[in-house]
Amino acid sequence: MKQHLNTLFVQTDGAWLRKDGRAILVSVDGQVRIRVPVHTIGGIVCFGRINATTPLLAMCAEEGVAVSFLSEFGRLRARVCGFTPGNVLLRRDQYRAADDEPTCLRIAGPMVAAKIANCRTTLLRGTRDHPDPEGRLDLACRRLAPISRRALAAADLEAVRGFEGDAAAVYFGAIDQLITLPRPDRDPFLMTERSRRPPRDPFNCLLSFLYAMLAHDARSACEACGLDPAVGFLHRDRPGRPSLALDLMEELRSFLCDRLALSLINRRQIHEKDFHALDGGAVNLTDSGRRTVLSAYQSRKQDEITHPYLQERVSVGLIVHLQARLLSRLLRGELECYPAFIWK
């Protein structure tokens, strides 16, 4: 079992990361803000204009601590990590499987079916807890169920991707019904459509930021168990894209990120003032808003649930690591099918 280490998030513009013995120092304007022993950290995520010294990066590479540099929107720019400790035989199995469409379909089909099922569960729980006078939530749930079954039985990968797109249109067309704030407080968080690169409204901004955090964790999970995060089965290969990490994210998007976004809004932990609009229509989180979201994300990862396949109590933050290891077992021929994560 992988030890659940913390992630160090650095978001103050102009901050410097330095090495001090076997510890990480973060300083701003020459003043040390925090000192953290490197063995207690699982990863470092830097937002915006953050600087890091070469000795610090070398130490992190030696200790297996990945350092990710993201834009202020949460988009990955670069990632520094040491030599991959993975099993070369496992990676050869992964590459062969990625070149075989039937094998890709055996993996991608359950992933997408589980993603859609988890989206439906998110909406179903909303129908029990929130009024739905227009019936949008109930209609969306009834439409998602057959799409999930079709994705699992799809004949090729293009069909799987098509069903995923159909489900996304249904799901994101209804999700803002789960915002329970009274008017006019809820109006800034209403979402007419899913927009990315850049997000065009606060809700989309919040989702994109949380997805970036999950992508970082999924990529780390791939590296930790020896898989190549760039070679996926659902997402096509593209230079610079962590396709396998994006694959592993799919089952957890609604369970972890979407529900957390809704909780932050409904509990008034995040407000309209925590966002600001940029030239061109993009919406970004403020520094205080990012701190609120990051704190909530780290706290959510500490919650425990029973894993549906392993039937063990695990922290939410370990699920993506467990799914990566289950996938590696499938690639080695130890499992007949991929046990996707389905939230109930």
Image (cartoon, rainbow, N blue to C red):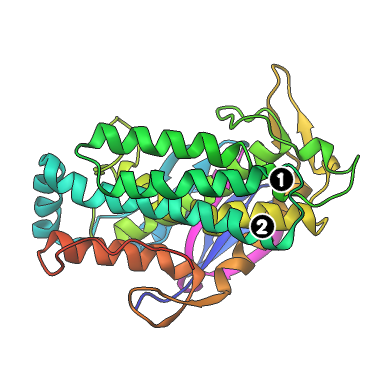
Q: Which residue is mark 2?
A: 126
Q: Residue at x 69, y 16 (%)?
A: 280
Q: Main secondary structure of the magenta part?
A: strand
* Residue 245 position in % (x across, y down): 36, 49
Residue range in magenta is: 30-52
Say which label, 2 or 1, has the lower sequence index.
Answer: 2
Number of marks in picture: 2
* Residue 185 position in % (x across, y down): 88, 43
Q: Quadrant of residue 300?
A: bottom right
For this orientation, the residue located farthest to the bottom is 312
**Does residue 102 appear left or right of residue 248 in this picture?**
left
Residue 64 is labelled as none
> Taking the image as drawn, is residue 228 in sight?
no
**Circle 1: is it few (<14), some (14-19), or many (20+) Cα within 10 Å?**
many
* Residue 61 position in % (x across, y down): 36, 57
Kind of residue sitting beneath label 2: Gly
Kind of residue sitting beneath label 1: Gln
Residue 236, placed above or below residue 288: above
Tag 2, which secondary structure? helix
Q: Which residue is mark 1?
A: 177
Residue 176, placed above or below residue 333: above
Contact (Cβ within 8 Å) of mark 2 with mark 1: yes
Q: Residue at x 8, y 46 (%)?
A: 96
